[in-house]
Image (cartoon, rainbow, N blue to C red):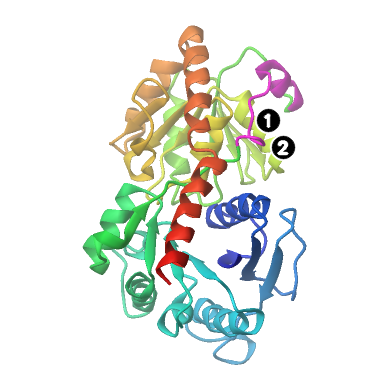
């Protein structure tokens, strides 16, 4: 079987890209040939996943890249569609996110599956205008033209039906998975020693690269007045102030160390389809306090794996932090249950669900 994966970036640095990479890695174990198309300035990009990575340099509408704000995305969509024809044929085309406009409207009879990692309707909520409306049309076209639409959460499924009039009959919900072989708990004392953190403090952790979308100020205020000693911020540089400690961008192994060193993950995001960071935290045995908009509430049990906060007020997060942070027995029990929950969402198990869909597509074509 030869599968075309249409990604966002060639380097696996974002949630969507990590999903593409981990899913492809599992498929390769089944001797499936996987080609990943991703934005890059190189024709080919080496990858730890041993897949062929086909770098795509997007067309620009005007010289020197001056044009509409979405020129790069649609230029990438167009160039990707053209390259797919060059490197094909494929048994299945598997698109992700809003990277598949031309691949959907000009599709041939090759089985076509789309995974939606959220919807632009929600991302742009309250700010939709003539300049960004094409993104919505592109996403709707993909939802209309694909054979099967995979939603990464029940909430995203409802968004596809509500905003794009997608048929519920062709939507399947497959939550994102986590690499439980890589994200494994390590000893908390040893983790804190590696990060030069005082052993006897309590730590909340925030992970991300978009402080506005993931409400970093909310996390800072929540910890500042809580019984927690420090907030560790990963993914961004900044000046340490009060209880906030910026660890900057970390390599993957150091990120695993940070998950293991912390007592809780704070994830007060404005909107996610089904985010990767809380899954990674759970796999490392870290309880999570998340916003309702994260959709992680679809899989966790309140008080067992953490809490879902329905109020964006920092006081609501502060209350949950205090409820967990000073009870060592509770933290220990929650840690074991978090790890066990993550094992149910391993990429081995989630990839098996995709494999069943692939077989259905091939059988129907």
The image position of residue 6, as x and y in percent, is: 55, 68
The image position of residue 167, as x and y in percent, is: 25, 65
Numbered mark located on residue 64 in the image: none
Q: Which residue is mark 2?
A: 253
Tell me where the magenta segment starts and ends, as one range.
180-194
Determine crowd level at label 1: few under 14, some 14-19, many 20+ residues with C-alpha closer than 10 A: many
Helix, strand or loop for disc 2: helix
Residue 51, above or below 296: below
Task: State which quadrant residue 132 falls in.
Answer: bottom left
- Asked if labels 1 and 2 touch by Cβ distance under 8 angstroms, the answer is yes
Position of the N terminus, as image quadrant, is bottom right
Along the viewing direction, whichever of 281 and 248 lies nearer the viewer: 281
Which residue appears at 48% of the width and 79% of the height? Answer: 103
Q: CA distance from mark 2 to mark 1?
A: 6 Å
Q: Which residue is mark 1?
A: 257
Residue 292, above or below 88: above
């Amino acid at each position: 079987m030869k599968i075309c994966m249409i990604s966002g970036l060639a380097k696996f640095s974002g949630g969507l890209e990590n999903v593409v990479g981990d899913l492809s890695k599992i498929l390769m174990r089944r001797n499936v040939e996987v080609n990943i198309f991703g934005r890059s300035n190189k024709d080919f990009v080496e990858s730890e996943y041993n897949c062929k990575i086909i770098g795509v340099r997007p067309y620009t509408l005007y010289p020197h890249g001056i044009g509409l704000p979405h020129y790069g995305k649609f230029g990438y969509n167009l160039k990707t569609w053209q390259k797919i024809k060059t490197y094909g044929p494929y048994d299945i085309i598997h698109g992700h996110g809003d990277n598949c406009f031309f691949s959907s409207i000009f599709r041939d009879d090759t089985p076509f599956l789309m995974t939606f990692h959220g919807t632009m309707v929600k991302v742009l909520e309250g700010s939709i205008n003539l300049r960004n409306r094409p993104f919505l049309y592109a996403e709707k076209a993909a939802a209309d033209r694909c054979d099967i639409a995979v939603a990464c959460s029940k909430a995203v499924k409802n968004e596809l039906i509500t905003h794009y009039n997608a048929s519920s009959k062709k939507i399947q919900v497959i939550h994102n998975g986590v690499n439980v072989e890589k994200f494994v708990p390590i000893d908390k004392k040893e983790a804190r020693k590696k990060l030069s953190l005082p052993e006897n403090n309590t730590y909340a952790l925030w992970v991300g690269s978009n402080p506005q979308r993931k409400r970093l100020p909310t996390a800072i205020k929540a910890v500042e007045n809580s019984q927690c000693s420090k907030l560790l911020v990963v993914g961004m540089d900044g000046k340490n102030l009060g209880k906030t400690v910026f660890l900057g961008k970390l390599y993957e192994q150091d990120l695993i160390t940070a998950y293991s060193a912390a007592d809780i993950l704070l994830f007060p995001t404005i909107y996610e389809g089904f985010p990767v960071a809380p899954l990674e935290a759970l796999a490392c045995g870290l309880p999570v306090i998340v916003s309702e908009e994260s959709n992680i509430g679809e899989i966790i049990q309140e008080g067992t794996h953490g809490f879902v906060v329905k109020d964006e007020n920092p006081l609501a997060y502060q209350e949950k932090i205090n409820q967990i942070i000073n009870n060592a027995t509770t933290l220990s029990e929650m840690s074991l249950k978090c790890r066990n929950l993550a094992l149910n969402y391993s990429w081995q198990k989630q990839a098996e669900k995709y494999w069943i869909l692939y077989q259905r597509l091939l059988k129907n074509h």
